[in-house]
């Protein structure tokens, strides 16, 4: 501690340089705190001692010049001077001791708080390390799952690529099959200059051949007969061969004849089996 006093009020603790209140119980207070507290009651704010007696609390000037200091003790006998100096030194020693005790108490409290903080932070560090270890394990698990998912995605991509290739192959095969069926359904036509006629084998090298599938309703000319072979006779129906009056063969004839699975007498009087009825 240096050669200055500190206010003994617990919430003040400021350095005293001018006037200060000094008590008989060896405590000292700043002028502001002393006036405020001693107006309430003549009780020491530090130790609660009674200060109601004469000269138990005085206002002292702490900043005296040298001449004033010499004149304060002038005229006193040596024993009085020594008594005054002894009391003054005792006051100084008590203030030093009190300051050391206060600082020791504060140091103990700070040490206890520091130990508590160290213990708390150590426990916090251990807990954080444990949490970090758990998080690292979870991260490793997630990384493994992510790698497995990447492998599955790659396998799915490969399978999808194969499926796409197979789909394209089947699509090409379908188109080829469809084209073949259409070629079988519609015979290609070629323009030879005299009308559209069916073509046998297509000659793609000819520039005057034009493939054409005629629209509905356009009549097709029958192909010419092959040389050396008779042409196919035209097809006629039975009803077209009969006269108009003998079309209905399930009823009696026009002249009273009856048809039983065969026709009656012909127009010339003959009998027809398996043909037209009575003439």
Image (tube, rainbow, N blue to C red):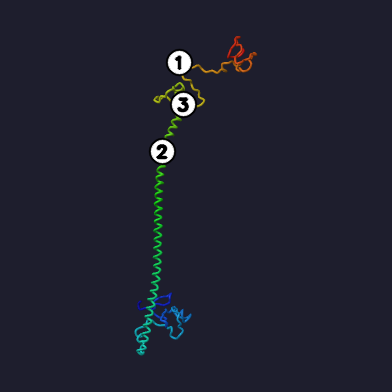
x then y, percent, for residue 120: 41, 64
Is 141 rendered above or below residue 112?
above
| Mark nearer the N terminus (1 vs 2) | 2
Q: CA–CA distance between discs 3 and 1?
A: 26 Å
Q: Tag 3, which secondary structure?
A: helix
Identify the residue at the far right of this view.
Answer: 256
Residue neighbourhood size for the residue with mark 2, other residues' Cα within 10 Å, grouped as few (<14), some (14–19), many (≥20): few
Is 67 rendered above or below residue 251?
below
x then y, percent, for residue 141: 40, 51
Q: Which mark is residue 229?
A: 1
| Mark nearer the N terminus (3 vs 1) | 3
Is 98 rendered above or below residue 211?
below
Q: Tag 1, which secondary structure?
A: loop
Determine if residue 79 is in view. yes
Q: Mark 2 highlights which residue?
A: 162
Q: CA–CA distance between discs 3 and 2?
A: 33 Å
């Amino acid at each position: 501690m240096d050669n200055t006093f500190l206010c003994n009020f617990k919430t003040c603790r400021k350095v005293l340089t001018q006037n200060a209140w000094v008590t008989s119980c060896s405590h000292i207070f700043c002028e502001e705190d002393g006036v405020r507290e001693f107006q309430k009651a003549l009780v020491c704010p530090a130790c609660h001692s009674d200060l109601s007696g004469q000269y138990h609390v005085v206002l002292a000037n702490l900043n005296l010049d040298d001449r004033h200091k010499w004149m304060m003790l002038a005229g006193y006998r040596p024993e009085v001077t020594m008594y005054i100096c002894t009391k003054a030194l005792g006051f100084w020693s008590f203030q030093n001791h009190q300051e050391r005790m206060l600082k020791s108490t504060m140091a103990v409290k700070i040490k206890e708080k520091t130990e508590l903080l160290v213990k708390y932070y150590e426990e916090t560090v251990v807990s954080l390390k444990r949490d970090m270890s758990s998080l690292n394990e979870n991260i490793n698990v997630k990384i493994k799952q992510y790698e497995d998912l990447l492998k599955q995605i790659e396998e799915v991509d490969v399978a999808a690529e194969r499926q796409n290739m197979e789909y394209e192959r089947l699509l090409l095969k379908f188109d080829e099959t469809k084209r073949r069926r259409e070629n079988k359904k519609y015979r290609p036509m070629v323009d030879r200059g005299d009308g559209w006629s069916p073509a046998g084998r297509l000659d793609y090298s000819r520039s005057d051949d034009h493939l054409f599938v005629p629209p509905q309703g356009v009549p097709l000319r029958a192909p010419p007969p092959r040389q050396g072979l008779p042409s196919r006779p035209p097809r006629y129906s039975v009803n077209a061969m009969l006269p108009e009056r003998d079309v209905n063969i399930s009823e009696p004839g026009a002249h009273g004849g009856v048809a039983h699975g065969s026709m009656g007498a012909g127009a010339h009087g003959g009998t027809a089996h398996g043909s037209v009825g009575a003439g």
